[in-house]
Amino acid sequence: MSFQKIISYLIIISGFFGSAFLAADIGPFSLFPFRIFLLLLWFIFILGFFLKKGRLNISYIKTKEYLLFLLFWLCYAFLSFGWAEDKGGAIRDITFLFIGCSLIFFTVFYLRNLKDLKWFYYIWIVVLIILIPIGFWERFTGNHLAVSGLFETTHLIKKFMPSAVFNNPNDFAAFLVLTFPFLFSFLRYNKGFFKKFFIIFLILCSLYLLLFTYSRVNYLALILELSFIFLFIFKLKSKFKALIIIALLILAVVIILPEQFSKITGLFREQISSLFYQIETASVGIRINLIKNSLLCLSKSFGFGVGTGNAEYCIENYGVYWTKDIVNVHNWWLEILTNYGIFVFAGYLIFYLSLIRSLYKYHKQLTTYKKPPKTENKQLTTERMICEVLLISLIGFFLASISSSSIMAFNSQWLLFAFSLAFLNYSRQK
Protein backbone atom coordinates (compact mmCIF):
# COMPACT_ATOMS: atom_id res chain seq x y z
CA MET A 1 0.00 0.00 0.00
CA SER A 2 1.46 3.35 -1.06
CA PHE A 3 2.04 6.16 1.39
CA GLN A 4 -0.48 8.31 -0.50
CA LYS A 5 -3.12 5.60 -0.17
CA ILE A 6 -2.50 5.35 3.59
CA ILE A 7 -2.96 9.12 3.90
CA SER A 8 -6.16 8.82 1.83
CA TYR A 9 -7.57 6.31 4.32
CA LEU A 10 -6.58 8.56 7.22
CA ILE A 11 -8.41 11.43 5.50
CA ILE A 12 -11.53 9.28 5.12
CA ILE A 13 -11.45 8.13 8.75
CA SER A 14 -10.77 11.59 10.20
CA GLY A 15 -13.28 13.12 7.78
CA PHE A 16 -16.16 11.45 9.60
CA PHE A 17 -15.10 12.95 12.93
CA GLY A 18 -14.24 16.42 11.65
CA SER A 19 -13.32 18.82 14.44
CA ALA A 20 -14.78 16.66 17.23
CA PHE A 21 -11.36 15.56 18.46
CA LEU A 22 -7.87 17.11 18.60
CA ALA A 23 -8.97 20.46 17.17
CA ALA A 24 -6.79 23.55 17.59
CA ASP A 25 -7.83 27.12 16.76
CA ILE A 26 -5.17 29.01 14.80
CA GLY A 27 -6.39 32.55 14.28
CA PRO A 28 -9.48 32.55 12.05
CA PHE A 29 -8.99 28.86 11.14
CA SER A 30 -9.33 25.62 13.03
CA LEU A 31 -6.90 22.76 12.45
CA PHE A 32 -7.74 19.14 13.17
CA PRO A 33 -6.53 15.75 11.84
CA PHE A 34 -8.79 15.74 8.76
CA ARG A 35 -7.49 19.06 7.46
CA ILE A 36 -3.89 18.27 8.38
CA PHE A 37 -3.95 14.97 6.46
CA LEU A 38 -5.64 16.66 3.48
CA LEU A 39 -2.99 19.41 3.38
CA LEU A 40 -0.27 16.75 3.63
CA LEU A 41 -1.72 14.81 0.70
CA TRP A 42 -1.95 17.97 -1.40
CA PHE A 43 1.71 18.69 -0.62
CA ILE A 44 2.75 15.15 -1.63
CA PHE A 45 0.62 15.31 -4.79
CA ILE A 46 2.04 18.66 -5.93
CA LEU A 47 5.60 17.62 -5.06
CA GLY A 48 5.20 14.42 -7.08
CA PHE A 49 3.72 16.39 -9.97
CA PHE A 50 6.82 18.63 -10.21
CA LEU A 51 9.25 15.77 -9.67
CA LYS A 52 7.67 14.04 -12.67
CA LYS A 53 8.09 17.27 -14.66
CA GLY A 54 4.39 17.94 -14.95
CA ARG A 55 3.43 14.47 -16.15
CA LEU A 56 0.27 13.12 -14.55
CA ASN A 57 -1.21 9.75 -15.45
CA ILE A 58 -4.99 10.02 -15.39
CA SER A 59 -5.70 7.48 -18.12
CA TYR A 60 -7.32 5.13 -15.61
CA ILE A 61 -9.79 7.80 -14.48
CA LYS A 62 -13.03 7.04 -16.32
CA THR A 63 -15.22 9.56 -14.50
CA LYS A 64 -13.63 12.70 -15.91
CA GLU A 65 -16.97 14.34 -16.75
CA TYR A 66 -17.95 14.27 -13.06
CA LEU A 67 -14.60 15.66 -11.94
CA LEU A 68 -14.75 18.36 -14.62
CA PHE A 69 -18.11 19.51 -13.27
CA LEU A 70 -16.63 19.78 -9.76
CA LEU A 71 -13.77 21.82 -11.21
CA PHE A 72 -16.29 24.06 -13.01
CA TRP A 73 -18.25 24.48 -9.77
CA LEU A 74 -15.11 25.41 -7.88
CA CYS A 75 -13.99 27.89 -10.56
CA TYR A 76 -17.45 29.44 -10.62
CA ALA A 77 -17.31 29.82 -6.83
CA PHE A 78 -14.00 31.73 -7.15
CA LEU A 79 -15.49 33.86 -9.94
CA SER A 80 -18.63 34.65 -7.91
CA PHE A 81 -16.42 35.91 -5.08
CA GLY A 82 -16.09 39.06 -7.15
CA TRP A 83 -19.77 39.98 -6.80
CA ALA A 84 -20.44 38.37 -3.39
CA GLU A 85 -21.21 41.09 -0.84
CA ASP A 86 -20.34 39.06 2.24
CA LYS A 87 -16.67 38.24 1.63
CA GLY A 88 -16.29 36.33 4.90
CA GLY A 89 -19.17 34.00 4.04
CA ALA A 90 -17.76 33.57 0.53
CA ILE A 91 -14.30 32.57 1.80
CA ARG A 92 -15.85 30.09 4.23
CA ASP A 93 -17.97 28.49 1.48
CA ILE A 94 -15.10 28.29 -1.01
CA THR A 95 -12.95 26.62 1.65
CA PHE A 96 -15.56 23.93 2.36
CA LEU A 97 -16.22 23.41 -1.35
CA PHE A 98 -12.50 23.05 -2.08
CA ILE A 99 -12.15 20.53 0.77
CA GLY A 100 -15.11 18.51 -0.54
CA CYS A 101 -13.88 18.49 -4.13
CA SER A 102 -10.36 17.56 -2.97
CA LEU A 103 -11.78 14.64 -0.99
CA ILE A 104 -13.59 13.35 -4.07
CA PHE A 105 -10.60 13.81 -6.38
CA PHE A 106 -8.08 12.04 -4.15
CA THR A 107 -10.47 9.17 -3.46
CA VAL A 108 -10.95 8.55 -7.19
CA PHE A 109 -7.24 9.09 -7.88
CA TYR A 110 -5.82 6.75 -5.25
CA LEU A 111 -8.52 4.14 -4.48
CA ARG A 112 -8.59 2.21 -7.74
CA ASN A 113 -9.35 -1.46 -7.06
CA LEU A 114 -12.10 -3.43 -5.36
CA LYS A 115 -10.00 -4.12 -2.28
CA ASP A 116 -9.58 -0.36 -1.72
CA LEU A 117 -13.33 0.16 -2.02
CA LYS A 118 -14.04 -2.72 0.33
CA TRP A 119 -11.82 -1.04 2.92
CA PHE A 120 -13.82 2.17 2.46
CA TYR A 121 -17.02 0.20 3.06
CA TYR A 122 -15.74 -1.35 6.29
CA ILE A 123 -14.38 1.97 7.54
CA TRP A 124 -17.87 3.47 7.19
CA ILE A 125 -19.41 0.69 9.32
CA VAL A 126 -16.64 0.91 11.95
CA VAL A 127 -17.27 4.66 12.25
CA LEU A 128 -20.94 3.90 12.95
CA ILE A 129 -19.90 1.39 15.63
CA ILE A 130 -17.87 4.18 17.29
CA LEU A 131 -20.64 6.78 17.03
CA ILE A 132 -23.47 4.64 18.41
CA PRO A 133 -22.08 4.54 22.02
CA ILE A 134 -21.57 8.32 21.87
CA GLY A 135 -25.20 8.71 20.79
CA PHE A 136 -26.47 6.54 23.65
CA TRP A 137 -24.24 8.41 26.11
CA GLU A 138 -25.88 11.67 25.00
CA ARG A 139 -29.34 10.14 25.04
CA PHE A 140 -29.15 8.87 28.63
CA THR A 141 -26.86 11.43 30.31
CA GLY A 142 -27.79 14.67 28.55
CA ASN A 143 -24.09 15.40 28.02
CA HIS A 144 -22.58 16.30 24.64
CA LEU A 145 -19.20 16.72 23.02
CA ALA A 146 -17.91 20.29 22.78
CA VAL A 147 -18.36 20.24 18.98
CA SER A 148 -22.12 19.80 19.34
CA GLY A 149 -24.45 22.77 19.16
CA LEU A 150 -26.26 21.20 22.12
CA PHE A 151 -23.18 21.39 24.34
CA GLU A 152 -24.28 22.70 27.77
CA THR A 153 -27.82 23.34 26.52
CA THR A 154 -30.49 23.66 29.22
CA HIS A 155 -33.43 22.87 26.95
CA LEU A 156 -35.12 19.83 28.51
CA ILE A 157 -35.85 17.97 25.24
CA LYS A 158 -32.80 19.04 23.22
CA LYS A 159 -30.51 18.10 26.09
CA PHE A 160 -31.17 14.38 25.48
CA MET A 161 -31.11 14.49 21.65
CA PRO A 162 -28.08 12.67 20.21
CA SER A 163 -25.75 14.53 17.85
CA ALA A 164 -22.54 12.41 18.24
CA VAL A 165 -19.57 14.13 16.58
CA PHE A 166 -21.77 16.41 14.49
CA ASN A 167 -22.90 19.97 15.06
CA ASN A 168 -26.58 19.11 15.49
CA PRO A 169 -28.97 16.14 15.65
CA ASN A 170 -30.10 16.69 12.05
CA ASP A 171 -26.58 16.03 10.77
CA PHE A 172 -26.32 12.89 12.90
CA ALA A 173 -29.73 11.76 11.63
CA ALA A 174 -28.59 12.32 8.03
CA PHE A 175 -25.47 10.24 8.70
CA LEU A 176 -27.60 7.41 10.15
CA VAL A 177 -29.92 7.46 7.13
CA LEU A 178 -26.99 7.43 4.69
CA THR A 179 -25.41 4.57 6.68
CA PHE A 180 -28.52 2.37 6.87
CA PRO A 181 -27.93 0.91 3.35
CA PHE A 182 -24.42 -0.16 4.44
CA LEU A 183 -25.95 -2.28 7.19
CA PHE A 184 -28.82 -3.53 5.05
CA SER A 185 -26.59 -4.77 2.23
CA PHE A 186 -24.03 -6.27 4.63
CA LEU A 187 -26.91 -8.26 6.10
CA ARG A 188 -27.97 -9.42 2.63
CA TYR A 189 -24.61 -10.45 1.25
CA ASN A 190 -22.75 -11.86 4.25
CA LYS A 191 -23.28 -15.23 5.90
CA GLY A 192 -22.80 -16.27 9.51
CA PHE A 193 -25.18 -16.08 12.46
CA PHE A 194 -23.02 -13.82 14.63
CA LYS A 195 -22.35 -11.38 11.77
CA LYS A 196 -26.05 -11.09 11.00
CA PHE A 197 -26.98 -10.81 14.67
CA PHE A 198 -24.45 -8.00 15.21
CA ILE A 199 -25.63 -6.08 12.11
CA ILE A 200 -29.28 -6.40 13.20
CA PHE A 201 -28.23 -5.04 16.59
CA LEU A 202 -26.54 -2.06 14.87
CA ILE A 203 -29.66 -1.45 12.77
CA LEU A 204 -31.90 -1.41 15.86
CA CYS A 205 -29.50 0.93 17.70
CA SER A 206 -29.35 3.25 14.67
CA LEU A 207 -33.14 3.35 14.34
CA TYR A 208 -33.50 4.09 18.05
CA LEU A 209 -31.04 7.00 17.89
CA LEU A 210 -32.60 8.26 14.66
CA LEU A 211 -36.00 8.35 16.35
CA PHE A 212 -34.71 10.56 19.17
CA THR A 213 -33.00 13.04 16.87
CA TYR A 214 -36.57 14.17 16.07
CA SER A 215 -35.41 14.78 12.50
CA ARG A 216 -38.68 14.22 10.69
CA VAL A 217 -37.31 14.83 7.19
CA ASN A 218 -34.79 12.05 7.80
CA TYR A 219 -37.62 9.74 8.86
CA LEU A 220 -39.05 10.38 5.39
CA ALA A 221 -35.60 9.88 3.82
CA LEU A 222 -35.37 6.44 5.46
CA ILE A 223 -38.87 5.59 4.23
CA LEU A 224 -37.76 6.68 0.74
CA GLU A 225 -34.77 4.30 0.94
CA LEU A 226 -36.94 1.42 2.12
CA SER A 227 -39.46 2.08 -0.65
CA PHE A 228 -36.70 2.08 -3.26
CA ILE A 229 -35.35 -1.20 -1.86
CA PHE A 230 -38.77 -2.82 -1.97
CA LEU A 231 -39.67 -1.56 -5.46
CA PHE A 232 -36.37 -1.68 -7.34
CA ILE A 233 -33.91 -3.88 -5.44
CA PHE A 234 -36.04 -6.79 -4.26
CA LYS A 235 -37.35 -9.26 -6.80
CA LEU A 236 -40.88 -10.62 -6.50
CA LYS A 237 -39.89 -13.57 -4.32
CA SER A 238 -37.83 -11.32 -2.04
CA LYS A 239 -40.76 -8.91 -1.70
CA PHE A 240 -42.97 -11.66 -0.24
CA LYS A 241 -40.15 -12.82 2.06
CA ALA A 242 -39.58 -9.28 3.29
CA LEU A 243 -43.26 -8.75 4.06
CA ILE A 244 -43.48 -12.02 5.98
CA ILE A 245 -40.28 -11.37 7.98
CA ILE A 246 -41.35 -7.83 8.87
CA ALA A 247 -44.79 -9.04 9.96
CA LEU A 248 -43.25 -11.77 12.15
CA LEU A 249 -40.74 -9.36 13.69
CA ILE A 250 -43.42 -6.83 14.55
CA LEU A 251 -45.59 -9.58 16.03
CA ALA A 252 -42.67 -10.86 18.13
CA VAL A 253 -41.85 -7.37 19.47
CA VAL A 254 -45.53 -6.71 20.26
CA ILE A 255 -45.73 -9.95 22.25
CA ILE A 256 -42.35 -9.70 24.02
CA LEU A 257 -42.10 -5.91 24.57
CA PRO A 258 -45.64 -4.53 24.25
CA GLU A 259 -45.08 -1.42 26.39
CA GLN A 260 -41.82 -0.38 24.68
CA PHE A 261 -43.33 -1.02 21.24
CA SER A 262 -46.31 1.16 22.09
CA LYS A 263 -44.07 4.02 23.29
CA ILE A 264 -41.80 3.95 20.24
CA THR A 265 -44.61 3.71 17.69
CA GLY A 266 -46.50 6.44 19.56
CA LEU A 267 -43.48 8.74 19.41
CA PHE A 268 -42.99 8.01 15.71
CA ARG A 269 -46.65 8.71 14.93
CA GLU A 270 -46.47 11.92 16.94
CA GLN A 271 -43.42 13.14 15.02
CA ILE A 272 -44.79 12.27 11.59
CA SER A 273 -48.23 13.72 12.35
CA SER A 274 -46.61 16.91 13.63
CA LEU A 275 -44.89 17.24 10.26
CA PHE A 276 -48.27 17.33 8.53
CA TYR A 277 -49.80 19.41 11.32
CA GLN A 278 -47.20 22.09 10.71
CA ILE A 279 -48.61 22.61 7.23
CA GLU A 280 -51.30 24.61 8.98
CA THR A 281 -48.87 26.47 11.25
CA ALA A 282 -46.13 29.05 10.89
CA SER A 283 -43.28 26.52 10.57
CA VAL A 284 -44.02 25.52 6.99
CA GLY A 285 -44.99 29.11 6.27
CA ILE A 286 -41.47 30.15 7.25
CA ARG A 287 -39.99 27.48 4.98
CA ILE A 288 -42.14 28.72 2.10
CA ASN A 289 -41.09 32.31 2.75
CA LEU A 290 -37.44 31.22 2.82
CA ILE A 291 -37.97 29.72 -0.63
CA LYS A 292 -39.62 32.95 -1.83
CA ASN A 293 -36.78 35.07 -0.47
CA SER A 294 -34.22 32.74 -2.04
CA LEU A 295 -35.89 32.99 -5.44
CA LEU A 296 -36.07 36.75 -4.99
CA CYS A 297 -32.31 36.81 -4.38
CA LEU A 298 -31.81 34.61 -7.45
CA SER A 299 -33.80 37.01 -9.62
CA LYS A 300 -31.83 39.91 -8.16
CA SER A 301 -28.66 38.23 -9.47
CA PHE A 302 -30.28 37.65 -12.90
CA GLY A 303 -29.95 33.89 -12.42
CA PHE A 304 -26.18 33.91 -11.84
CA GLY A 305 -26.46 33.46 -8.07
CA VAL A 306 -25.75 35.91 -5.27
CA GLY A 307 -22.22 34.56 -4.86
CA THR A 308 -20.75 31.64 -2.98
CA GLY A 309 -21.85 31.55 0.67
CA ASN A 310 -24.05 34.66 0.33
CA ALA A 311 -27.57 33.19 0.40
CA GLU A 312 -27.97 33.96 4.12
CA TYR A 313 -26.62 37.49 3.71
CA CYS A 314 -29.00 38.20 0.84
CA ILE A 315 -32.06 36.84 2.68
CA GLU A 316 -31.15 38.83 5.79
CA ASN A 317 -30.63 42.11 3.92
CA TYR A 318 -32.91 41.88 0.89
CA GLY A 319 -35.59 39.35 1.87
CA VAL A 320 -39.10 40.82 1.92
CA TYR A 321 -41.04 37.81 3.26
CA TRP A 322 -41.27 37.16 7.02
CA THR A 323 -39.07 34.27 8.24
CA LYS A 324 -38.99 34.91 11.99
CA ASP A 325 -35.36 36.15 11.74
CA ILE A 326 -34.31 32.80 10.21
CA VAL A 327 -31.99 33.49 7.30
CA ASN A 328 -30.51 30.07 6.53
CA VAL A 329 -32.12 28.46 3.50
CA HIS A 330 -32.53 25.01 5.20
CA ASN A 331 -32.52 23.35 1.80
CA TRP A 332 -29.33 22.12 0.13
CA TRP A 333 -30.79 22.20 -3.38
CA LEU A 334 -32.12 25.73 -2.96
CA GLU A 335 -28.86 26.81 -1.34
CA ILE A 336 -26.91 25.77 -4.45
CA LEU A 337 -29.41 27.53 -6.71
CA THR A 338 -29.31 30.76 -4.70
CA ASN A 339 -25.54 30.88 -4.20
CA TYR A 340 -24.37 29.70 -7.62
CA GLY A 341 -27.25 30.30 -9.99
CA ILE A 342 -29.05 28.21 -12.55
CA PHE A 343 -25.98 26.95 -14.46
CA VAL A 344 -24.24 25.33 -11.49
CA PHE A 345 -27.58 24.09 -10.13
CA ALA A 346 -28.45 22.43 -13.46
CA GLY A 347 -24.97 20.90 -13.59
CA TYR A 348 -25.25 19.59 -10.04
CA LEU A 349 -28.67 18.08 -10.78
CA ILE A 350 -27.28 16.33 -13.86
CA PHE A 351 -24.23 15.23 -11.82
CA TYR A 352 -26.47 13.70 -9.13
CA LEU A 353 -29.05 12.04 -11.42
CA SER A 354 -26.41 10.77 -13.84
CA LEU A 355 -24.49 9.15 -10.97
CA ILE A 356 -27.64 7.36 -9.79
CA ARG A 357 -28.46 6.29 -13.35
CA SER A 358 -24.96 4.90 -13.94
CA LEU A 359 -24.95 2.96 -10.68
CA TYR A 360 -28.45 1.62 -11.35
CA LYS A 361 -27.43 0.39 -14.82
CA TYR A 362 -24.34 -1.30 -13.42
CA HIS A 363 -26.39 -2.86 -10.63
CA LYS A 364 -28.76 -4.32 -13.22
CA GLN A 365 -25.77 -5.78 -15.08
CA LEU A 366 -24.40 -7.33 -11.89
CA THR A 367 -27.71 -8.96 -11.00
CA THR A 368 -28.04 -10.64 -14.42
CA TYR A 369 -25.26 -13.10 -13.59
CA LYS A 370 -27.14 -15.93 -11.95
CA LYS A 371 -24.29 -18.38 -11.35
CA PRO A 372 -20.87 -16.82 -11.92
CA PRO A 373 -17.68 -18.92 -11.92
CA LYS A 374 -16.45 -19.80 -8.43
CA THR A 375 -13.32 -17.68 -8.89
CA GLU A 376 -15.46 -14.60 -9.60
CA ASN A 377 -18.26 -15.31 -7.13
CA LYS A 378 -16.72 -13.47 -4.17
CA GLN A 379 -15.71 -10.50 -6.29
CA LEU A 380 -19.15 -10.27 -7.90
CA THR A 381 -20.88 -10.43 -4.50
CA THR A 382 -18.70 -7.59 -3.20
CA GLU A 383 -19.44 -5.49 -6.28
CA ARG A 384 -23.17 -6.08 -5.93
CA MET A 385 -23.06 -5.17 -2.26
CA ILE A 386 -21.13 -1.91 -2.73
CA CYS A 387 -23.11 -0.84 -5.80
CA GLU A 388 -26.38 -1.48 -4.00
CA VAL A 389 -25.24 0.45 -0.92
CA LEU A 390 -24.23 3.53 -2.88
CA LEU A 391 -27.36 3.50 -5.02
CA ILE A 392 -29.76 3.34 -2.04
CA SER A 393 -27.76 5.87 -0.03
CA LEU A 394 -27.79 8.37 -2.91
CA ILE A 395 -31.57 7.98 -3.17
CA GLY A 396 -31.92 8.76 0.54
CA PHE A 397 -29.59 11.75 0.14
CA PHE A 398 -32.28 13.58 -1.86
CA LEU A 399 -34.34 14.16 1.32
CA ALA A 400 -31.62 13.78 3.96
CA SER A 401 -29.80 16.77 2.43
CA ILE A 402 -32.62 19.18 3.30
CA SER A 403 -32.84 18.32 7.00
CA SER A 404 -29.95 20.51 8.15
CA SER A 405 -29.56 24.26 7.82
CA SER A 406 -26.61 23.63 5.47
CA ILE A 407 -24.53 20.58 4.53
CA MET A 408 -21.67 22.32 2.73
CA ALA A 409 -19.40 21.44 5.69
CA PHE A 410 -21.03 18.02 6.21
CA ASN A 411 -18.15 15.68 5.29
CA SER A 412 -20.35 12.57 5.12
CA GLN A 413 -22.01 13.83 1.94
CA TRP A 414 -18.63 14.44 0.25
CA LEU A 415 -17.47 11.00 1.39
CA LEU A 416 -20.59 9.42 -0.10
CA PHE A 417 -20.01 11.06 -3.48
CA ALA A 418 -16.29 10.24 -3.29
CA PHE A 419 -17.08 6.57 -2.64
CA SER A 420 -19.69 6.53 -5.43
CA LEU A 421 -17.38 8.05 -8.04
CA ALA A 422 -14.47 5.80 -7.02
CA PHE A 423 -16.69 2.74 -7.44
CA LEU A 424 -18.09 4.01 -10.76
CA ASN A 425 -14.53 4.60 -11.95
CA TYR A 426 -13.61 1.04 -10.96
CA SER A 427 -16.65 -0.40 -12.76
CA ARG A 428 -15.87 1.54 -15.96
CA GLN A 429 -12.28 0.30 -15.93
CA LYS A 430 -13.66 -3.22 -16.02
Image: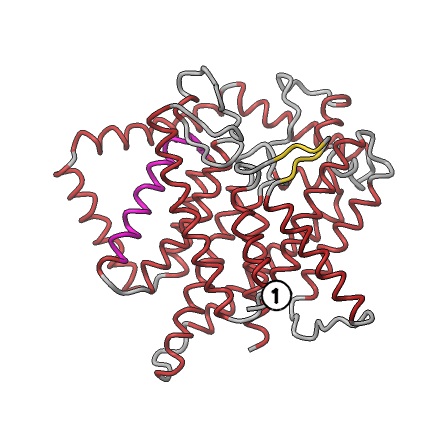
Which x, y percent locates residue 268? Answer: 33, 32
Which residue sits furthest left?
A: 255
Q: Is residue 106 left or right of residue 213?
A: right
Residue at image x 66%, y 32%? 25
Which x, y percent locates residue 344? Answer: 73, 48
Residue 131, relative to residue 43: is it above or below?
above
Which x, y percent locates residue 59? Answer: 70, 75
Q: Is residue 402 left or right of residue 292?
A: left
**Quarter of the image containing the N terminus?**
bottom right
Which residue sits furthest right?
A: 82
Residue at image x 64%, y 45%? 35
Secondary structure mostly seen in magenta is helix
Task: Answer few, some or many: residues within 10 Å of disc 1's Cα (few below 14, many 20 plus, some between 14 and 19).
Answer: some
**Quarter of the image containing the C terminus?**
bottom right
Color theme of the render? secondary structure
Residue 213 lies in magenta, yes or no? yes
Query: Quarter-wise, where is residue 50 in the image?
Result: bottom right
Residue 136 lies in magenta, yes or no? no
For label 1, the residue is 110
Q: In this view, does 258 lie to the left or right of 362?
A: left
How many numbered discs, if any?
1
Query: Quarter-wise, where is residue 287 in the image?
Result: top right
Q: What residue type is labelled 1?
A: Tyr
Which x, y percent locates residue 394? Answer: 52, 53
Which residues make up the magenta segment? Answer: 195-216
For numbered disc 1, what is the local secondary structure? helix
Residue 385, relative to residue 221: is it above or below?
below
Residue 237, relative to residue 225: is it above or below?
below
Query: Quarter-wise, where is residue 139 in the image?
Result: top left
